Amino acid sequence: MDIFSIIVFCIYIIIILMILVYISPLLSALVLVLIPVASVYLLPGLSVRFFSAQQFSFAGVPVQNIHIMLSVWSALIGIVAYTEVLSWYLSKDEKSEPGKKTVPAAGSISSKPEEPAKSLKTKAEVFMLKLGKVLSGKK
């Protein structure tokens, strides 16, 4: 296998994993797709030569860099999806489940009045704040 291809794929994987760990899983998924697409758009001849370079042959079937790239993509997308599901599950509150209603204990008086319905503007603001937290990497 060509050493240049190994170095390019290792750098690519390290960049994606660093963004995944230190910034955001969603941004790493975006960069995961944008780097190869941008390279094909900006340097089409060089990218096509790189992706079509044959690395080895397995049982008479040629394995090219594009095949290696697709396997790297599937592995990294699996890691990103697992990270997103795990972070969602860990940040989920028991009291915020929509189907569950808490019943006050016998003899206790609820001092908290019912909250009025939120307006569309308030819901949009809350959504944008949560989106900002997710994209900044905060849980």
Image: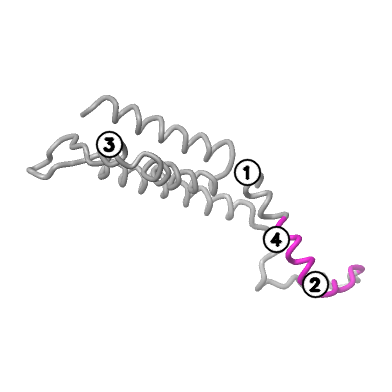
The numbered mark, 4 or 3, whose residue comes first in the sequence reads 3
Q: For the residue carrying disc 1, how many other residues have a C-alpha within 10 Å: few (<14), some (14-19), or many (20+)? A: some
The numbered mark, 1 or 3, whose residue comes first in the sequence reads 3
- Checking the image for residue 119, the label placed there is 2
Q: For the residue carrying disc 2, how many other residues have a C-alpha within 10 Å: few (<14), some (14-19), or many (20+)? A: few
Q: Residue at x 12, y 38 (%)?
A: 57
The image shows residue 63, relative to residue 131, as above or below, that is: above
Residue holding disc 4: 127
Q: Residue at x 45, y 46 (%)?
A: 34
2 vs 3, front mark? 3
Q: Which residues are magenta?
A: 111-128
The numbered mark, 2 or 3, whose residue comes first in the sequence reads 3
Residue holding disc 1: 137
Residue type, numbered disc 3: Phe
For the residues labelled 1 and 4, the Cα–Cα distance comes to: 15 Å
Residue type, numbered disc 4: Phe
Q: Which image quadrant: the N terminus?
A: top left
